[in-house]
Amino acid sequence: MRYFFVDPSQIATSRAVIEGAEASHLKNVLRLTRGETVFLVDGSGFEYLALIDRLLPGRVELAITDRKPSAGIAPIRVHAAQGYLKDKKMDRVARQLAELGVARFIPLISERAVVRPASGPSSFRQERWRKISIEALKQCHRGDLMSIEDLIDFKSLLETGRRYDRCILFWEGGTHALTTQQPVGAAVEAQSVLVVLGPEGGFSDQEAAAAEAAGFWIAKLGPRILRAETAAVAACAIVQYLYGDLGPGQKSLDKECPTA
């Protein structure tokens, strides 16, 4: 059955409205018609079974027949700060991390960043990454939409560390794998994890030292030097294995709706 994203503001008790590109895709590409059943997901933890009711210019109106909490939400909140990469690489990383269940995608300016866009929400590909997040949400049947954060510098990122149960900076100069840095059972206790990943040139020695001084764990991804976009996927997969629902414990989210 087809999945469509609908903004929570467009959902009432028994009605929903799809607009824009989603409506166009439903009508003009898939050629769905009145009376057909579809799944809707609102990105805030719920999904809906709905019947197509009216197909209008620029919008589709639907009758909701069922509502339930989504099962595709990671039990931990992984926030991934990615050192800024060239645009297409950042697009790929955003897509793959959304598929892995990452809650927030934070573009990061660090010392060795090859690309340095001006700071601020309107100066980088924020809307593009949000669209990618929506596509991944539908493809992977995840119930929460990966949030796209504003551009941040390295110093400011370190200052946010106290908000998380775990802060992990992955660096090729690290001396330990993540699993050897933590006490047995520590993963079970974590509810929020900040994962920090470098740009094409990695992090400098000074940045790694500053992160360690700020209480971040410094971890490595094995004996091989990975491309930045590969490292991002590997790191977040490891974190989801240790703390989330990819490991043998397959922990689940107990509450109905997630909080960012």
Image (cartoon, grey):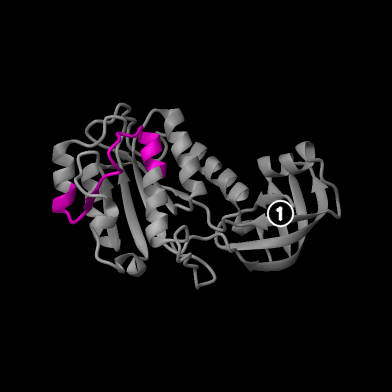
Which percent across, then down, holds residue 243? 38, 61
> Is residue 47 found left or right of 158 in the rendered image?
right
Tell me if mark 1 has few (under 14), some (14-19) or many (20+) residues whose alpha carbon lies within 10 angstroms of its own: many
Q: Residue at x 52, y 47 (%)?
A: 99
Residue 216 falls inside the magenta stretch: yes
Visible in this render: residue 98?
yes
Q: Where is residue 134 in the image (x, y as percent from the top left)?
A: 57, 46
Which residue occupies the foreground of this view, 205 or 256?
A: 205
Relative vertical location of residue 57 with respect to residue 73 in this rendering, above or below:
above
Residue with the mark numbered 1: 17
In which quadrant of the rendered view does residue 192 lie?
A: bottom left
Residue in view at x 25 percent, y 36 percent: 110
Residue 202 lies in the magenta-colored region: no
In magenta, the rendered stretch is 211-233
The furthest residue to the bottom: 254
208 versus 125 height, above or below: below
Q: Residue at x 61, y 54 (%)?
A: 141
* Residue 50: quarter of image: bottom right
**Quadrant of the frame with the C terminus:** bottom left
Label 1, secondary structure: give it: strand
Q: In the picture provided, is 27 more to the left or to the right than 182? A: right
Nearer to us in this view, 29 or 18: 29
